[in-house]
Amino acid sequence: MEPHPFIPLRWNERSHEEMLALAKANYTELAQRRTTRHFSSRDVDRRLIELAILSGSTAPNGAHLQPWTWVAIRSGELQAKLRAAAEAEERKTYSERMPEAWSEVLAPLGTDAVKAHLTDAPWIVVLFRQKKRERGNGNWGPTYYSVESCGIAAGMFIQAVHHMGLVTLTHTPSPMGFLRELLGRPAHEEAMLVMPVGYPSEEATVPDIHRKTLDEVAVFHDEQA
Ligand code: IYR
């Protein structure tokens, strides 16, 4: 492959006060994000979805192969098919496949095999992970750290959706093989996340959960403390 030319990094020095204010504002905004299962059918401008996808696609990723494909769906017919297929898998998951250790931690969150959000939300974005890349001349090679890359991209997509004032839900129908077929994606792409995007319904609720404190999630080895 051709080497990339190197260009100066665009970066602006900020005062400590400004950095602290920005960091606090960003944390406050992110702390207000919640996943809800209750979507309004109110339409969302396609440009907003495009911007969320572009935002997710700025993610750092393995060898800059950008191993993601976002399939954005605003189609009653396709959403109904997707919901029927997802619910068929999920019914088996919830009733047969889910071991007790799993249902034990899911039960308090009230999730079940009914996936109304797949037909309620105006948009469904399905993130596919590219496991391989085309090297030319019909040769294929692996992608690298595609799980990490797509995980980061999904996080940045979710942040972008929240920042613009919409809500999303990371739905993980399992197994996900049906999505490749339904959406006509090639064999080297694997569906990773299904994300309805839209406005919350007026009666939207969320479980009253609490996030772990800094002490519970972080360990510092800090000589200056
Ligand atoms: N895949 C199912 C089940 C599910 C699993 C976990 I872990 C969750 O945090 C929530 C749901 C689904 O998407 O409903």
Image (spheres, helix red, strand yellow):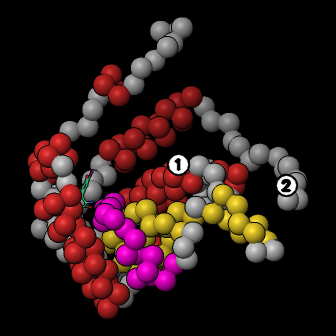
The span picked out in magenta is: 168-185
Quadrant of the image occupied by residue 162: bottom left
131 and 220: which one is in front? 131
Numbered-mark total: 2
Q: Secondary structure at mark 1?
A: helix
Placement of 68 over or under 72, stated as above or below: above
Rendered location of residue 125, percent (x, y):
42, 72
- The circle on residue 148 is 1
Dominant secondary-structure state across the stretch colored magenta: loop
Residue 169 in the magenta stretch? The answer is yes
Which residue is drawn at the image coordinates 27% and 32% (left, top)?
212
- The circle on residue 4 is 2
Q: Amino acid at mark 2?
A: His
On the picture, is 139 further left or further right than 121? right
Rendered location of residue 85, percent (x, y):
28, 78
Q: CA distance from mark 1 to mark 2?
A: 23 Å
Rendered location of residue 222, percent (x, y):
51, 12
Question: Is the N terminus in the top left, top right, bottom left or bottom right quadrant?
Answer: bottom right
Q: Secondary structure at mark 2?
A: loop
Rendered location of residue 143, percent (x, y):
64, 57
On the picture, is 215 further left or further right than 59? left
Q: Nearer the viewer, mark 1 or mark 2?
A: 1
